[in-house]
Amino acid sequence: MTATQPVARGPARSSWLKIGPWVWFLLLILAFAAGALLAVGTGRVHSGHRTENCDLKGDVPLLLDGCDLRAKELGKADLKGARMRGADLAGTDLSKKDLQGADLQVASLAGTVLREAILAGAKLHGADLRGADLTGACLRGADLTLSDMTGATVPNGALANATMTGALGLSPAAAAGPATGCPSVSK
């Protein structure tokens, strides 16, 4: 080998691979932005909640994962043990509804009226309960882990025997004392 010949150091790299990581990152951001603009322009943007196959008269327990139930008439629906993960129930009136054992994980229940509702054993892990009215509701054994209850109306003792690890916006009095609002319910 002569001194004037370059030393071979592996296969030659294409010039497009020499682009730095920040340029790739910017290209990725532009691709996402273009997709978002296309979705808005074509009218294909939605809230992420489904409206089809959200039948409230189906087999019990109902499977309503991800359903937009804000405009639905829930008066006669049997929601005991229903699976409503990620469902949008914001602002609905669920007063005196039996939601015992219902799976409402990461559901939106912001501003929902849950007066005297039975939520014993309900899974409300990560649910949005901001501003909800839980006056007289039974939450015995409910899982409220990581839920947001900021501004919710929760009477003293309403959360006795409920799991509240990492829940936001709770007053210590809500968990103190005997469970209130719980009729004789079977688990």
Image (cartoon, grey):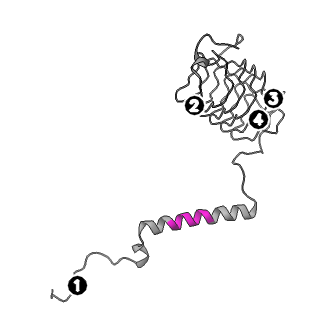
Name the mark nearer the viewer: 3 or 2. Answer: 2
Magenta-tinted stretch:
26-33
Q: Is residue 28 magenta?
A: yes
| x and y, in percent, of residue 163 in the image | 56, 22
Q: Secondary structure under badge 1?
A: loop
Q: Which residue is mark 2?
A: 168
Would you identify the image quadrant in which residue 30 lies?
bottom right
| x and y, in percent, of residue 2 in the image | 15, 88
In the displayed structure, 10 sits above or below 119; it is below
**Label 1 – label 3 distance at C-alpha:** 79 Å
**Mark with earlier residue (3, 2):** 3
Q: Secondary structure under badge 4?
A: loop
Q: Which residue is mark 4?
A: 91
Q: Amino acid at mark 3?
A: Ala
Residue at figure coordinates x 61%, y 63% from the top left? 33
Q: Which residue is mark 3?
A: 77
Q: Secondary structure under badge 3?
A: loop
**Label 2 – label 4 distance at C-alpha:** 19 Å
**Label 4 – label 1 distance at C-alpha:** 73 Å
Instruction: Say which mark, if any, is on residue 100.
Output: none
**Mark with earlier residue (3, 4):** 3
